[in-house]
Amino acid sequence: MSALNQNKRMTIDEAVELIEKADLKTLGRMATEVKKRLHPKGVTTFVVDRNINYTNICWVDCKFCAFYTHEKKEDSYILTFDEIDEKIEELIAIGGTQILFQGGVHPKLQIEWYEDLVEHIHNKYPTITIHGFSAIEIDYIAGRSKLSVSEVLARLKAKGLSSIPGAGAEILSDRVRDIIAPKKLGTQKWLEVHREAHKLGIKSTATMMYGTVETTREIVEHWDYVRQLQDETGGFRAFIMWSYQSDNTQLKRELPTITKTTPNQYLRYLAVARLFLDNIPNIQSSWVTQGSYIGQMALKFGANDLGSTMMEENVVSAAGAANSMNQKEMIELIRDVGEHPAKRNTAYEILERF
């Protein structure tokens, strides 16, 4: 296949051909070669962090989400600062360094609330990195507060925001987005938020959720959007991909014919993502949705990072994913495939080797 030529950049057509026709073992071998070039010391990293969902109130009503609720529902909440403090102190007690901070898109909260929150955490817990607020949250805060996206990001950075997650990308195809999340921001707006963050020196991650109504080509076109923006800004630290979890979702009720994705698909996509995203340094294994065994297999298909020990996770677990792993288990899993485990921070700097 032409995609085996290492001297030129992989095209969309070549990536589609590999996904649909290549032997799985061949893909693993190709992805491992690229991984070894990028990470020749054989180090696999992870981060000790906690997901804190500050609210489950959301007006966006994504059909694939089982986490959100509406403001007047009995199970709705906004965490108090004291409740957030308690969660952070539990994280610090086990050696954690980062909080992944995001919520539903609350219809009433404005920039001042977010500034107070970030400033409070940053001042009280200076050792904790705040990796928070997805593109849809940033964009909505801007509209609600009559500010530009750049102004919102600059103000939050001034209060202590370090980086932003790639959540809300799903598939960067407006056709797909109109089906699975019609109220959500479009492809170009998602890219614009990350572009503006990168301009301000705020790094981010890129993500993808597959397994709904997308085509193979739309998956690769998603990668191409990410690769183009990375060429422009260099602001993405990592790429993280996971499969749609269908339990308790409106999308499952509306489209019950959507079939559960397979481990083969996950590893196939992951390997080709590693080949295609030649300018993204880190690829994360999604053991949270795939389970620890496939999460470990991902290390043989291009992933060099196991992501978070996930002290707390509420979103995909609400949709049926119930996998968990602690630091000790991660270390053993990494060693089991002959690689060297290391704890990192948000910036992928090594904090401790094992």
Image: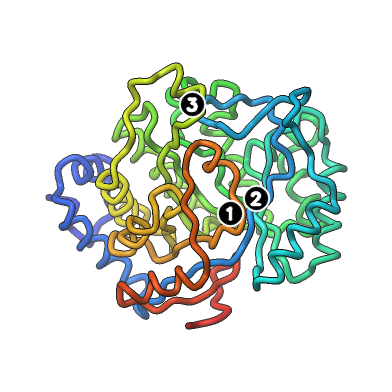
Mark identifier at residue 307: none
Q: Judge the density around disc 3: few (<14), some (14-19), many (≥20) Cα neighbours within 10 Å.
A: many
The residue pinned by badge 1 equals 204
Residue at image point 80% right, 36% down: 147
Mark identifier at residue 177: 3
Q: Amino acid at mark 1?
A: Ser
Q: Secondary structure at mark 2?
A: helix
| Residue 311 locus on image (x, y percent) | 60, 59
In front of the other: 222 or 302: 302
**Upstream in sequence: badge 3 or badge 2:** 3
Q: Is residue 48 above or below residue 238?
A: below
Q: Are marks 2 and 1 in contact (CB under 8 Å)?
A: yes
Q: Is residue 30 above or below residue 185?
A: below
Q: Say which of marks 3 and 2 sits in front.
A: 3
Q: Amino acid at mark 2?
A: Ala
Q: Secondary structure at mark 3?
A: helix
| Residue 160 locus on image (x, y percent) | 78, 59
Q: Amino acid at mark 3?
A: Arg
| Residue 150 locus on image (x, y percent) | 72, 44
**Upstream in sequence: badge 2 or badge 1:** 2
Residue lying farthest to the top in this orientation: 254
Question: Can you tell which quarter of the image residue 58 is in?
Answer: top right
In front of the other: 158 or 137: 137
Q: CA distance from mark 1 to mark 3?
A: 21 Å
Q: Are marks 1 and 3 in contact (CB under 8 Å)?
A: no
Q: Secondary structure at mark 1?
A: strand
Residue at image point 33% right, 40% down: 220
Residue at image point 45% right, 16% down: 254
**Upstream in sequence: badge 1 or badge 3:** 3
In front of the other: 96 or 118: 96
Mark identifier at residue 197: 2
Q: CA distance from mark 2 to mark 1?
A: 8 Å
